[in-house]
Image (spheres, rainbow, N blue to C red):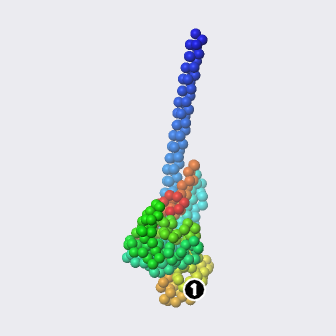
Amino acid sequence: MMRQRGIALITVLVVVAIISGIASSVILEQQFAIRRTENLLHGNQGILYLFALETWAKEVLIIDASKSAAGDHLQEEWSKAIPPMAVEGGSVSGKIQDLQGLFNLNSLVKKTGKISIDAMQQFRCLLTEYAGSSISPDHVADATKDWIDPDQNVEADGAEDLDYLSRDPGYRSAGQYFISPSELLLIDGMSYEAWQNIRPFVTVYPVLKEESSYINVNTAPLEVLKCLNSDEDSQAIAGDIVQYRDETAAFESGAEVIEFLQQSGASDAKVKTWRIDVESSYFLLASAVVFGNHELRMHHLLARDLEKDRVTVLMRSFGDEW
C-alpha cells in the first residue's frame, strides 16, 4: 500500500512538473509574441513619422521656390533643422542639406562618357587638401573616374576590373554613376581615414546636364569653395565669398557672383572655369525618430523641379550613412 502511494505521489509530481513546464513555455512564448508585436507596431509607427518628415521637407522646398527668386542660401526656412520634437510615444527630428553646396562625384564624367577636366581639378584639389597623407590624390581621382565610365580603359593612374577582381572577395568597377557617396570606399587606393576626411565635402546626385552639378556658392563650405578653381588665388577669393555672404545673406544671381569674382581679381578666362550657381535642385533630408525602443534614421534624396513646382523623391536609405 505504501509503495503504491509513493508511486502515485511521484506520478502527481511528474504531472505537475510537466504542466508547470508547459505553462512556463506558453507564458514565455506569449511574452515573445507581445514583444514582437510591440516592435512591429513601434517600427511601423516610426516609419510613418519618417514619411511625415519627408512630406514636410517637400512642402518647405516648394514654398521656398514660390516665395524666393533670389537663389538658395542658408538663411532660408528649409535650412533650419527640426530639433528633437516630442510626439506621442517618442520624438522626431530632421535636417535638410543642400547637396549642390558639395562636390558631386558624378560630375567627373559627362553624359557623353568624356571626363570633365574642371570637375577633375576640383576633386584632385579636395583630395590633396583634405583627404590626408594616407592616399595618392592622383591615383584616387583617376580610379574614381574609371569607376564611373563604362569602358575598361585605365586612366593614367586609375583602376579597372582587373584591379578589383584580384581582391578577396573580388568585385568589378561600377561602370555607372555613383548611387551613394560611400561607394568611394570601394575605389582602389582609398583609405577609411581619407574617406572620413573627405566625406563632408562630397556627395552624389544625378547629372542631367553639366550645369546641374555646379556648386551653389551660397551654401558651399569654405573647403569646397577653395577648390572651385585650380588657381592659387581661388583660396583667397573663397574666403572673400564666405565673408560677403555672411555679411549680406546671399548672392542673388550668377551675374552678381561673376561680378564679385572679377572685383576680387579673377580674370574673365578664370571665371568661365568656376562651376558656380546660386540655385539648387538637389537636397538631402536626414530624418530620425525615436519611438518606444526603436531608433530609426533615414536619408531622403530630393529633387526639386523649379519649373514644374514639385519635389520628387529619388532615393530613400535607412541608417546613419547613405
Rendering quarter of residue 9: top right
Q: Is residue 246 visible?
A: yes
Q: In this view, which residue lies farthest toward the front?
A: 166
Nearest the viewer among 251 and 265 is 265
Query: Quick one: SS at disc 1?
Result: helix
Nearest the viewer among 309 and 261 is 261
Can you give x and y, in whole percent of width and height, for residue 7 in the image? 56, 16
Nearest the viewer among 60 and 257 is 257
Is residue 39 shown above or below 197?
above
Q: Count the labels in the image.
A: 1
Is residue 283 shown above or below 233?
above
Image point (48%, 69%), residue name: 187
Can you give x and y, in whole percent of width and height, for residue 151 in the image? 38, 72
Instruction: From the viewer's perspective, tell me whether residue 25 is left or right of residue 115.
Output: right
Other-residue count near label 1 (Cα within 10 Å), few / some / many at <14 / 14–19 / ≥20? few
Give amino acid for label 1.
Asp
Can you give x and y, in whole percent of width and height, for residue 228 in the image? 53, 80
Can you give x and y, in whole percent of width and height, for residue 130 in the image? 58, 74
Image point (52%, 37%), residue name: 29
Image point (49%, 57%), residue name: 51
Image point (54%, 55%), residue name: 296
Q: Quadrant of the N terminus?
A: top right
Q: Is residue 71 visible?
A: no
Q: Give the labeled residue for mark 1.
A: 233
